[in-house]
Amino acid sequence: MRICVLGGGVIGVTTAYFLARDGHQVTLVERHADVARETSHANGGQLSYNYVAPLADPSVLPKLPHWLFSRDAALRFVPRLDPRQWHWCVAFLRACTRARSRATTEELLGLGFLSQRLMHEIVARETIDFDYVRNGKLVVFRDRDSFDGARRQADYQAQFGSEQYALDGAACVALEPALAHIGGEIAGGIHTPGEEAGDCDRFTRALARAAQREGVDLQVATEFSGLKTQGKLVEAAMTSAGAIEADAFVVCLGIQSQPLLGSLGVSVPVYPLKGYSLTLPATHATGAPRVSVTDAHHKVVYAPLGERLRIAGMVDLTGMSAHADPARIALLTRQARETFPDAGDYDAAQTWTGLRPATPDSKPLIGATHYRNLWMNTGHGALGFTLACASAQLLADLLAQRSLPINGDAFSPRR
C-alpha cells in the first residue's frame, strides 16, 4: 500500500518507520530541512513509561485559582478570545473525575509498557546513538500531602505491573547525591528504576535514516498546503513539490493537525501546552544528577543526556504562539539553579520552546477518521517521545486490521 505520512516529528518518523517495516511504500513529508525541528527538538528527554497519570485529575481543581493569578505557577493559564481554548478547558474540567483519571492511567500504562518493549527492540535492531540510558527516575516531593498522594498513585499502578518504590528524604539523597542541596526540603520521593532517558532529537533523526533504509521516501523542506478529497476519500496531499497521491494518509502534525483536519470537518480536540527547556554542559562529578529527576513542586524534569543536562518544565495555556516568554525561561533557570546549583554551566545553556499538542483527557488520538483512507496519530501532549513507538505500532495494526496488543478504542479519535 502507498502511504503518505504528514509530519516529521518523533510521532511522524516512528509512524513511517513502523509502516515501512510492515512492507508499505511510505512517503514522509516534513516542511523543515530536517526532522524533529519543533516540539520533538529539545523536550524533557525522559522516557516515563510508568509515570503517565493524566493532567486531568480532581487534585488539580483546588489549584486553578493559583494558575490563573500567579505568574510563577508551574501551570499558567491566560484566557484568550479563542473558542478552541474554551472548548478544550471545558472538556478538561469534565475529565477531572476520579473514575476517568484512573481509567486513563490504566490505558496510558498499557500504551507506555508496549512502547518501552518496542523501544528496546529498536535499540537492539538499529544502530542509533541518542544518549540513551536506563537510569531510572526519581520524583521528589517537597510537601507531605503531595508525597502521600503519589504513594497512593504508585500503589494503584502496581496492580498493572508498575514497579515503583516510596523513599524518604534521606533515601532520595542517597540514591541521587546531587539532591543534597535541597535534602532538607524533600518530604519523600517515588523511585521507578525501570525508567529511561534519551535525546528525542537525535533519536528521531537517526530513526529517520533507519526508515530510509527501509525504503521510506523522506521529503524534507516540503511545504504542505492541504488535502485533495473526493467524497469521503483523500486523493492527494498538496505540497510545494507537487501532489502526492497515496492509498492512505496519516496526519502526524501535532498542533497543526487541528486546522488541517478541521477544514475537512474532522474534529481534533487538541490545544498547545507550551513548554520550555534548557540544555547545558553538565558537571556530573560535582553536581548534575545521573538519575532522571522530577521536582514535583515546580513541575521541572532533569534528564542527563551524555555530557549534557536537559532541564524542562512549565505548562502554559496561553495560545497558539510558540514565542518564548523570557520571564518563564528566567523562572526555569532560577528554579534549576536553586535545586542543582553545581549541575553545569547555566550561562551556556541553550533554550527551547515547544507547543505540545494535548487532548483534554491526556490520551493521544490514534486511528481512523470518517474519511475512508485518512488516519491520525497526534495529541500526545508531553508524552510524545515516551509513547511514540507504541502509537506507531497501534496505527500500523489498525491500518492492517490486525488484532491489537492493547485496547485501541481507548485512543480512537471517535471516542
Image (cartoon, rainbow, N blue to C red):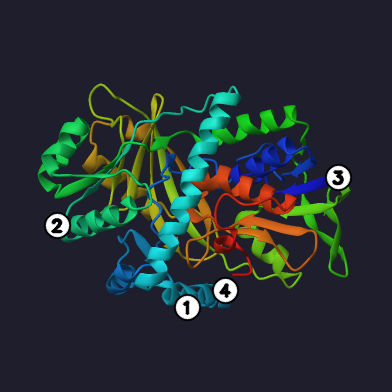
Q: Is residue 96 left or right of residue 322?
A: left
Query: Would you name the residue on which mark 2 appears?
Result: 144
Contact flag, marks 2 and 1 (Cβ < 8 Å):
no
Q: Earlier in the sequence, mark 4 or mark 2?
A: 4
Give the residue drawn at x 55%, y 37%. Answer: 118
Query: As rendered, which of 342 and 370 lies closer to the eye?
Result: 370
SS for dot 1: helix
Which residue is depicted at the point 75% across and 41% down? 221
Of the two numbered discs 3 and 2 in the rendering, the one whose residue sits closer to the viewer: 2
| Secondary structure found at label 4 | helix
Q: Which mark is residue 90?
A: 1
Check disc 3 and report its element: helix, strand or loop: loop
**Residue nearer the viewer, 398 or 50:** 398
Local crowd at mark 2 within 10 Å, few (<14), some, or many (≥20)?
few
Q: Which badge, 3 or 4, comes first in the chain's sequence?
A: 4
Coordinates of residue 77 in the picture (x, y in percent): 41, 68
Q: Which picture quadrant has residue 68?
A: bottom left
Quarter of the view holding residue 82: bottom right
Q: CA distance from mark 3 to mark 4?
A: 32 Å
Name the amino acid type tagged 2: Arg
Q: Amino acid at mark 3?
A: Ala
Q: Reading the chain from its start, which is encountered first: label 2 or label 1?
A: 1
Give the mark nearer the N terminus: 1 vs 3.
1
Q: Position of residue 244 (x, y in %)?
A: 86, 49
Labels 3 and 2: the sequence-earlier one: 2
Quadrant of the snapshot with the N terminus: top right
Number of on-image labels: 4
Give the CA distance from mark 3 to mark 2: 58 Å
On the image, numbered disc 3 is attached to which residue?
A: 241
Q: Are marks 3 and 2 in contact (CB under 8 Å)?
A: no
Mark 4 lies on residue: 84
Quote the CA–CA distance across marks 4 and 2. 37 Å
